[in-house]
Image: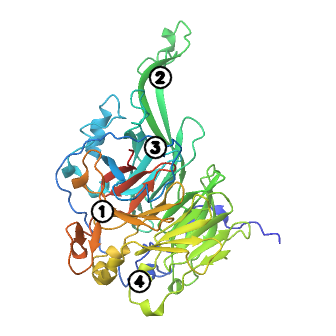
Amino acid sequence: MHQPPPASFCSSSSSSGGSSCECARVGVRVSALAPAAAPCPAPRRLPRPRQPEPPSRGTSTLLPARLGPWCSPTGSPAPLSCETGCGEGSWILVCRLLVPTQVSLLSMEEDIDTRKINNSFLRDHSYATEADIISTVEFNHTGELLATGDKGGRVVIFQREQESKNQVHRRGEYNVYSTFQSHEPEFDYLKSLEIEEKINKIRWLPQQNAAYFLLSTNDKTVKLWKVSERDKRPEGYNLKDEEGRLRDPATITTLRVPVLRPMDLMVEATPRRVFANAHTYHINSISVNSDYETYMSADDLRINLWNFEITNQSFNIVDIKPANMEELTEVITAAEFHPHHCNSFVYSSSKGTIRLCDMRASALCDRHSKFFEEPEDPSNRSFFSEIISSISDVKFSHSGRYIMTRDYLTVKVWDLNMENRPIETYQVHDYLRSKLCSLYENDCIFDKFECVWNGSDSVIMTGSYNNFFRMFDRNTKRDVTLEASRENSKPRAILKPRKVCVGGKRRKDEISVDSLDFSKKILHTAWHPSENIIAVAATNNLYIFQDKVN
């Protein structure tokens, strides 16, 4: 049946109307959302702001490592699996990088080659502030670049060094490629609200030419950035001198042809598009469509579809905001496009449900095509069931056949052809189930952990507390717990599996569940798209590990 013209394809300023209060983050009670015409009621539970633990003093150096192709003894690419990819003693530290502060950025600008990490960049830990805490990590489609965003609104891009002729397999280090301020703190005077500069998500676009493009977003505004190199500068202008000042036309007696002169390599980051004023609530997800012409941005109640060439209009494709905000029962927590079908996307909710939508069915995708939900066991029902069932991340597999979701305690894999239950469930830190009360009191129960696939969809990785991160092999059903810590950051140090002791006698190599440091947490991780190289963010430290090459 022919659909009427999409009336919701309106200017972004008109679509931002609604409630004058901000939507609380997922996990906080949804009653924090107020009706549009009424003041915001006090939520039953709001997380208290936490100050990060001041890091201990110390310095870091970049450690070179072999990052060559990960191959089997025959020379062909080996499968990525826990048996060889995340088993015991199979991961080594490549390097530990730090997000630069404003102090180190000033020092880097004085250097001739800002692509190299110097001592001012790997500065003393005492300069680290809350603005330096990494808030997102993302490889580009080739894995040659790795971007991080922090709470200070900065984006730092690391580039993988090319292999040398003498050491073919030492395609080594990820060095600083570009650093720029993506977002600044703002203030909404109409709503009397502060808008943080924190980078919530970064998404790369496939490279089409010599330049790189990426999307970055804070709570309200999405920006499209172009990152390009320049190693030549024009000289010999007719109307300007060498310093750029205008010349007196009376002194111009000859016509000169400008020429390009070599110069030191400079990496420039310029904003090409700014997509603003389309979200009333906090943006939690952005996803680039497989047609590479559109992308979507999702906040707590709405999902908007954008065209990269149009900044003043967006198409609202999902709107779950009820007419009466007192009837609100769930919020959107994450959303992502299908990797191959440009018409399909999924979004998750704070109730632990996943909805698959098809944009061919209707202009407004309020009616889902498929609904994924696991029935709850009444015997396990508790006060915290609603909070720990909230989905913090959703990811399509590279093949597009499966969906992976992460809630507070588990990672689940869903088959698109089976909606009633997940086909795989992995316990991330089930030993914390008995400590949910204390985790609720210190607000850790509201932490949002991400999850990632490896390049072949055979291994899953996600974070935990005490700087632990977990890997699960879907084929062998093996799992491993590893730790990203400054104490283990020796050159090419092999990561030893860690185990948590719940009760009884504790072995020498185990750590008691009562000794876990909940201020140290791995929320953001990334996996190289084609190799066994992972990036793990721990506060202001970025750890890069690779599979051990024999």
In what element is the residue under mark 4? loop
Residue type, numbered disc 3: Leu
Q: Nearer the viewer, mark 3 or mark 4?
A: 3
Q: Is residue 234 visible?
A: yes
N-terminal of the two: label 4 or label 2? 4
N-terminal of the two: label 1 or label 3? 3
Residue at mark 2 to residue at mark 1: CA–CA distance: 46 Å
Quadrant into which the C terminus falls: top left
- In the rendered image, residue 54, in percent from the top left (x then y), is placed at 20, 59
In what element is the residue under mark 2? strand
Disc number at residue 467? 1
Q: Residues within 10 Å of mark 1 (few under 14, many from 20)?
A: many
Position of 237 relative to 69 (above/below): above
- In the rendered image, residue 388, in percent from the top left (x then y), is placed at 41, 79
Disc number at residue 233? 2
Disc number at residue 145? 3
| Residue receiving disc 4 | 41
Residue at mark 1 to residue at mark 4: CA–CA distance: 36 Å
